[in-house]
Amino acid sequence: MNAWEVNFDGLPGLTHHYAGLSFGNEASAKHQYQVSNPQRAAKQGLLKMKALADAGFAQGVIPPQERPNVALLRQLGFSGRDEQVIAKAAAQAPELLSAASSASAMWVANAATVCPSADALDGKVHFTVANLSSLLHRASEASTTQAILEGIFANRDHFAVHQALPSVAAFGDEGAANHNRLGRDYGQPGIQLFIYGRDATGATQPQRYPARQTRAASEAVARLNQLNPNQAIFAQQNPHVIDRGVFHNDVIAVSNRQVLFCHAEAFVNQPALMAQLAQKIPGFIPIEVPASRVSVDDAVSTYLFNSQLLSKPDGSMMLVLPGEAQEHPRVWRYLNQLLADDNPIDELQVFDLRESMANGGGPACLRLRVVLTDDERRAVNPAVMMNDTLFATLNDWVDCYYRDRLTQADLADPQLLQEGREALDRLTQILRLGSLYPFQR
């Protein structure tokens, strides 16, 4: 059956700021308290979406969440009118206001784990929303993420959206950032590779940074997504690379169809994993980058592997990279050698995503991959699909509502809450998503 991969990119929100909230994400920590530009962040994201859509890759938009998250602040004991809640949080616990104002939902690779209909026992496309339980600023995203996905993938004949797993340490789930799907053709059954950082066996754990994804969570997601058990592989991420800033697997590996592009130190017992994948995937092509060519530190600083690997009509592949990879001499030298080598990758496409990168998210973080058949594509909310009209409309929308400068202190401005609500109210009309946010109900 014919099927294609459709990328749905998260749109950076109006409160995009640098607070260093993500422990283990070294780019986030490095840029803490610097001045951000939410308007530029949104426009950089839109430019990537439009360029890929123009190149023939189906591209959708996922809207931001409402921030500041006043409900979260109320749950943490701040009371009064919404403006008073924000003022009290700013005065008493600015770090909590920052967490409640995080625009981290832009990184929709963490929104959910997706199972295409070709892999599901019931023949539907499944989404299990990630609980993101390891960090406060992300753990409150799940309910709105579910509502957004249900608004985009509303046809219950084709799609099933599952609520997040219980928000406890044993079921820490970070979504598609720790998940790969491999196979020859999108429309044929594939092998789903779930990557976890910790399990219940007492296997070696990272010592410096936490392992966010658990094996128990990955196994539960596979069950919820109706995945055929014969098509699932569970592998542990190398704890030593987690301690060097690889907080999600998509910082050290990316796959597309039969290709797995990864660092040679990405997984525990990597040779055995590669042999298992070669046995299950016809024509499997592993591209393992040795540390002698690109160190783990280089990979983390440039987000070489936090890239998009996209199939072109002739079967060759394009690697979508952040500008930081091009600016690093050793990494760029390796990438140009990669083009000359015998593998399907024959094109590099570089985008300026500095606003997202400074907060710890590259091209792969910004997109959720969804494999869809023709019938399933027709069942998707068409208003979220990128085209000339939507690109122009969203750029005008950003110009109207977004600030071009934001610091942590600015989060206390009560006008920012009102600006955000007005913007999101208009956005739900543009994307035809109905009354999506709590303030609209």
Image (cartoon, rainbow, N blue to C red):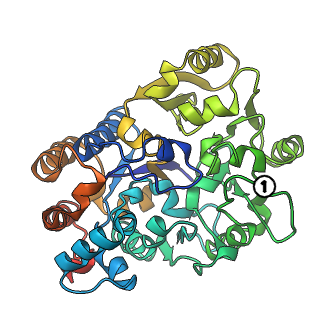
Q: Residues within 10 Å of mark 1 (few under 14, many from 20)?
A: many
**Is 92 situated above or below 372?**
below
**Is 355 situated above or below 5?**
above
The residue that mark 1 highlights is: 236
**Horizontal and vertical percent for residue 438?**
26, 79
Where on the picture, by quarter, is residue 432? bottom left
**Horizontal and vertical percent for residue 270?**
84, 43
**Horizontal and vertical percent for residue 295?**
70, 28
Outermost residue toward the front in this view: 92
**Horizontal and vertical percent for residue 66?**
28, 68
Type of residue at label 1?
Gln
Is label 1 in a helix, a strand or a loop?
A: strand
> Is residue 419 toward the left or the right of residue 101 in the image?
left
Of residue 189 and residue 354, the one placed in the foreground of this image is 354
> Is residue 350 toward the left or the right of residue 171 in the image?
left
Q: Residue at x 61, y 67 (%)?
A: 173
**Is 172 situated above or below 313?**
below
Of residue 142 and residue 104, the one placed in the foreground of this image is 104
